[in-house]
Amino acid sequence: MTDYVLSDATRAKYKKISTASIATALFKRGLRNQFIQGVVPVAPKAETMVGQAFTLRYIVAREDRNPITVFRNADHPQRVAMETCPPGHVLVMDARKDARAASAGSILITRLALRGAAGVVSDGGFRDAEGIGALDMPSYHARPSAPTNLTLHEAMDINVPISCGDVAVFPGDVMVGDRDGVMVVPAHLAEEIAEECTGMESYEDFVLEQVKAGEAIIGLYPQTKDEYREKYEAWRLKNGR
C-alpha cells in the first residue's frame, strides 16, 4: 500500500508521455522489468490510460470451490472489485498469464467504466471482448476468451501486491497504457518520472523533426554535439516546449 495520491497535474503529464519514454527513464534507475508482458489493447484508444493500481488476484480454481453458483455470493471478490475500485484508478488483474478462461466480461467491465475507473488490465483474457473494446475506457488483455473464469481461476484477494504479465504491481503504483502496452511506475518514483519524461518527449519530438529534415543520428540522439543543444533550445523557444 502507498500514501501516494496521483494529482491531476501529474496525471495530465502522463497523458502526454509514451510508454517507451517511461521504460527508458526507469531503466536509468535500474528498473528493467516494468512493461507488462503479453498484454495488448482490447481496442486502440486515442487517449493514454493513466491511473493508480487497484488490484485483484486470481489463483488456480479448484472444482469443489468454484461451481457457477459462487457468483450468487455477495462477497465474491471479482464482483466486489468491480464495485470498490476507486474512480480514476486502474483495475489490474493477476490472472496467472492464463487466457484460456476469461478474467472478466463486458457486463462487469461496463460497470467498472460507468463507476469512473481509468482503465483495466489483465494478463488473462476477456470474454465479450468486442463489447469491452467499444467502451471509452481503455482496456488491456492477453486475448479474447469465452469460458468463464470459474473454469480455471478463483478470484481470491483484493488490493494486494500481485504479479501481472511478469511485473510486480503494488496498490497505488501508476499504470500508464498506450497503443504499445502498459508500464508500471512505482508510486515513489511517479513524480520524478513524469517530470523527466516530459522533457524527454520534448527532445524526441525535436529529434524526429530533425531526422525527417535529413539530419544524421550521431551526435543528435543521444545529444552529444553542442550544435544540437543550441538548435534544441531555439526549437523549444519557438514551439513553447
Image (spheres, rainbow, N blue to C red):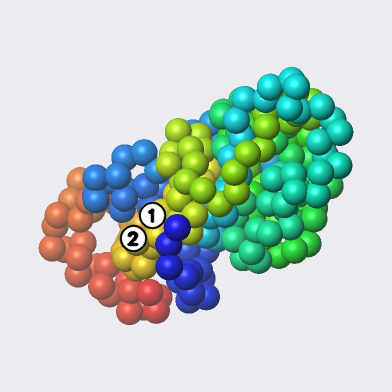
**Quadrant into which the N terminus falls:** bottom left
133 vs 37, left or right, is right
Could you say which is closer to the camera, residue 164 or residue 65?
Answer: 65
**Location of residue 204 in the rendering, given as x and y in whole percent from the top left corner:** 35, 57
Kindly identify the amino acid type of the residue bearing the numbered disc 2: Leu
Taking the spot 41% from the left edge, 54% from the top edge, the residue there is 185
Q: Quadrant of residue 210?
A: bottom left
**Quadrant into which the C terminus falls:** bottom left
Could you say which is closer to the camera, residue 169 or residue 18?
Answer: 169
**Location of residue 51 in the rendering, given as x and y in whole percent from the top left corner:** 55, 60
98 vs 106, left or right, is left
The residue tagged 2 is 189
- The image's mark for residue 174 is none
Could you say which is closer to the camera, residue 63 or residue 141?
Answer: 63
**Location of residue 10 in the rendering, given as x and y in whole percent from the top left corner:** 45, 71
- The image's mark for residue 186 is 1
Kindly identify the amino acid type of the residue bearing the numbered disc 1: Pro
Q: Are marks 2 and 1 in contact (CB under 8 Å)?
A: yes
